[in-house]
Amino acid sequence: MHRRPGLSARLKLTLSYAGFLAVAGALLLAVVWMFLLRYVPDNSRGLLGISPNRYLLVHTFAPAAAVAMLFLLVFGLVGGWILAGRMLAPLTHITAAARMAGNGSLSHRIHMKGRQDEFRELSDAFDSMLEQLESHVAEQQRFAANASHELRTPLAISHALLDVARKDPTRDRGELIERLRAVNTRAIDLTEALLLLSRSDRGNFVRESVDLSLFAEEAAETLFRLAEQRGITLDVTGGATRTSGSAELLLRMVTNLVQNAVVHNLPGGGTVTVHTEAYGDTSLLRVENTGRRLPPELVPTLIEPFQRGTERVRTDEHAGVGLGLSIVHSIVRAHDGTLDLVPRPAGGLLVTVRLPGTT
C-alpha cells in the first residue's frame, strides 16, 4: 500500500518531549514573573530602598531566561531523541521479524528479553502468531503432499490395469472392470473427503438449530448392518442435545465417529456406545468403543490427515481414506467446539466432542 512520506515515530516523540519541556520552562518563568517580579516596586528606590527595581530585574533576568529556554529546547531535542530511540528499539526488532516473515521465513523468533511491558507483550504475541503460522503452513504442506500421494495411488493402479487390458486381450475383462470400479470408487471417496475437509475448514455454512441425539440414532441405524456383520453391539444412549451448526457437517461428524468406532474394534464381541448429553451451555457427544490398546503417543496423530497408525490400518473394504478423524476435527473446530481423544486402559478409544449448546 502506497503512503505519502511523513515524520517518523522517533522524531514525533522527540518533538513532543522537547515541546513539553519548553512549555514546562515557560510555565516556570511565568510563575516567577507572577509571584516574584510583579511585587517588586517599579521606582528608582527599589524594594525598601536597598534592592533593584523591577526594570533592572527584568533586564537582568530576561537574557538569562532566554538562555535557559534555549538550553531546555536543545536538551529536550537531544534527550528526547535518545529516549525515543531507546523506547522504540523493541519495535525495530519486531519490524525486522515481520519483514522476515513476509519474505517467507516463519522460523525466526524475536525472543525479546527484559521485564514484562507492552513491547514485550507485543513481542510474545508476535512470536506466538509466527509459531502458529509455521505450524499451520507445515501442516498444509504435509497435507498437500499426502493428498497428492493418496490421489496418485488409485490413478497409478487404474493406469496399470488399463495397460494390462490393452496388452493382454485374453484377460478376464469382468475382473478388470470390477477392480477399476473399486479403485475409481476409492478415488471419488477421497476427493469428496478432501472437498468436505476444505469446506469445513473455511466455515462457510449456514447455521441452524440441530439435535445431536437424532444424528446419533441416524448414524447408528446406517451402520447397524456393518456392526452386526462384525459381531459388535451398537448402543445409543442419552437425551436431546441441541447445538447450532450445519446439519450436513454435524451428521457427517457423528457418522465418521461411529464408523471409526465400529471398524477399529475387536474382531468379535466388541461394543460401541454413543452417548449425547446437554450439560449446562455445552452439548456433549461421547463415542466409546472396545478394541486394541493404543499407545498414548499414537492418539494425538489420529486427527492428522492420512495418519492411520500401524495398529489401525485395515486392508478390507472399510479401509477408508485416512481422513475420518481429520474431518471430525475440522468440523468440530469450525463449530467452535473441542475434540478429546483418550485411550481406554482396557483397549479402544473414548472420543468426546463438546459443542456450544442452544435451547
Image: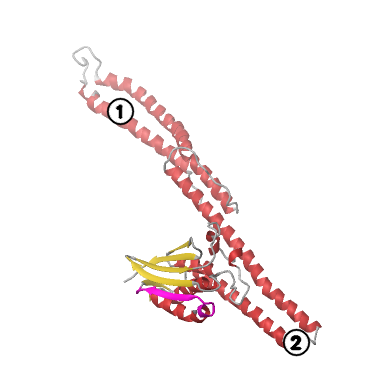
Q: Is residue 157 above or below residue 34?
A: below
Question: Residue at (66%, 68%) from the top-left corner?
Answer: 149
> Is residue 256 part of the magenta span, yes or no?
no
Amino acid marked by disc 1: Leu
Q: Nearer the viewer, residue 260 or 327?
A: 260
Quadrant location, the C terminus:
bottom left
Magenta residue span: 227-240
Residue found at the far front of this picture: 269
Q: Is residue 65 left or right of residue 303?
A: left
Pick out the residue farthest to the left. 48
Q: Nearer the viewer, residue 280 or 259?
A: 259
Q: Position of residue 313 (x, y in %)?
A: 60, 68
Q: SS class of the residue under badge 2? A: loop
Whether residue 230 appears in magenta in the rendering, the answer is yes
Outermost residue, top direction?
50
Say which residue label 1 marks: 29
Taking the image as shown, residue 33 lies to the left or right of residue 204, namely left
Classed neighbour count for the residue bearing mark 1: other residues with Cα under 10 Å, few (<14), some (14–19), many (≥20): some
Which callout, 1 or 2, points to the residue nearer the camera? Answer: 2
Q: Secondary structure at mark 1?
A: helix
User: For the residue carrying disc 2, how many other residues have a C-alpha within 10 Å: few (<14), some (14-19), or many (20+)?
Assistant: few
**Badge 1 or badge 2: first in the primary sequence:** 1
* Rendered view: 105 above or below 59: below
Dividing the picture into quadrants, the one containing residue 51 is: top left
- The residue depicted at 38 percent of the width and 73 percent of the height is 237
Name above or below for residue 224 compared with residue 69: below
Residue drawn at point x = 40 percent, y = 36 percent? 17
| Above/below status of 357 relative to 37 | below
In the rendering, at what x and y percent does residue 229 appear? 54, 80
Q: Position of residue 67 (x, y in %)?
A: 39, 25
Q: Which residue is mark 2?
A: 172
Q: Is residue 209 visible?
A: no
